Amino acid sequence: MSRDPQQYTERLEQTAGFLRERLGAAPPAAMVLGSGLGDFVEGLDNRRTLPYREIPGFPVSTVVGHSGQLTVADSPAGPMCAMQGRVHFYEGVDPWEVVVPVRALAAWGVRRFVITNAAGAVNTAFAPGDLMLISDHLNLLGDNPLCGPNLDALGERFPDMTTAYDPRLRDLARAAALRAGVFCREGVYAAVRGPSYETPAEIRMLRRLGADAVGMSTVPEVIALNHLRRPVLGISCITNMAAGIREEAMRHEDVLETTRRVRQDFASLLLELTRDLSAEE
Ligand code: HPA
């Protein structure tokens, strides 16, 4: 992958051109669906799907539960686009690579983004199966996708992160959750590099730092989208209590099992949300 700013931005434009050619005009909003949360799109009409490996420039993930495809579909509320699967820092890919998909979708013309993930509860009042609107984050990845030469064509050198998670989109999500009859918590998401789960001492540290949930994704995309000045909504599906809260070992299968249990609630919330995301602006 080239870190030459000109080559990199040309590659984004090529990817965007390919999406325009194959899928038409960009829908107003895109959703990035986290581990095990990908199947809600299967209920939507008029689906057109492209595996990531067929999209020039798109990185391909290697994780179980991330199938790696882009779908455009008609929800009852309007057109929408969903990414099932993403690449993570822990896969060892360049941070610039991790944010190629959201940057390419933005170059295609997508205005608003919903970034979702599976996360462990650091807040002991939370329970597996809860959904959490992300109010803010702690970037503990030890890296940032904006490091290196600034891509002036995309955004400024020192982007503001005061409202990294758009308060207006969060208002829409709260209202959508009420209509869908889905309970949502709100809180701070801490992104760690992984891929090992945290130790109980690390979870106690995260709690003291103000984290409510912990995961290994989302933050790179959110930083890149703030750089682009695109509004972002973040939603965590709480799949497990973080390490040391309960006397049990951490297992990726449990994470996937919880997402299977809550995918109906999650789908209802996302469907309600597409109504607002397609209608507003
Ligand atoms: N820690 C980190 N990432 C996660 C977790 C967790 O407990 N659950 C789901 N993703």
Image (tube, grey):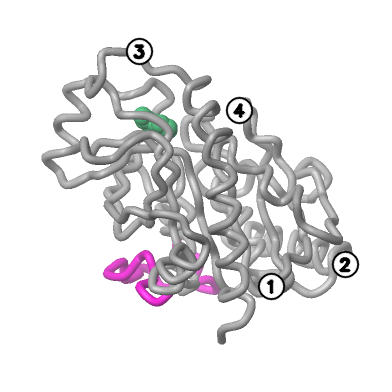
Q: Which residue is mark 2?
A: 21
Residue identifier under label 4? 63
> What amino acid does circle 2 point to?
Glu
Q: Are marks 1 and 2 in contact (CB under 8 Å)?
A: no
Element on which disc 4 rests: loop
Q: Secondary structure at mark 3?
A: loop
Residue 29 placed where, x, y %?
62, 69
Mark 4–mark 1 distance (CA, rounded to whole Å): 31 Å
Q: Nearer the viewer, mark 1 or mark 2?
A: 1
Residue 61: image tag: none
**How far from the left and from the top, in percent, is residue 194?**
39, 28
User: Foreground mark, 1 or 3?
Assistant: 1
Q: Amino acid at mark 4?
A: Val
Upstream in sequence: badge 3 or badge 4: 4
Disc with the residue nearer the chain's start (4 vs 1): 4
**Callout 2–callout 4 Cβ contact below 8 Å:** no
Depth check, front residue: 169 or 228? 169
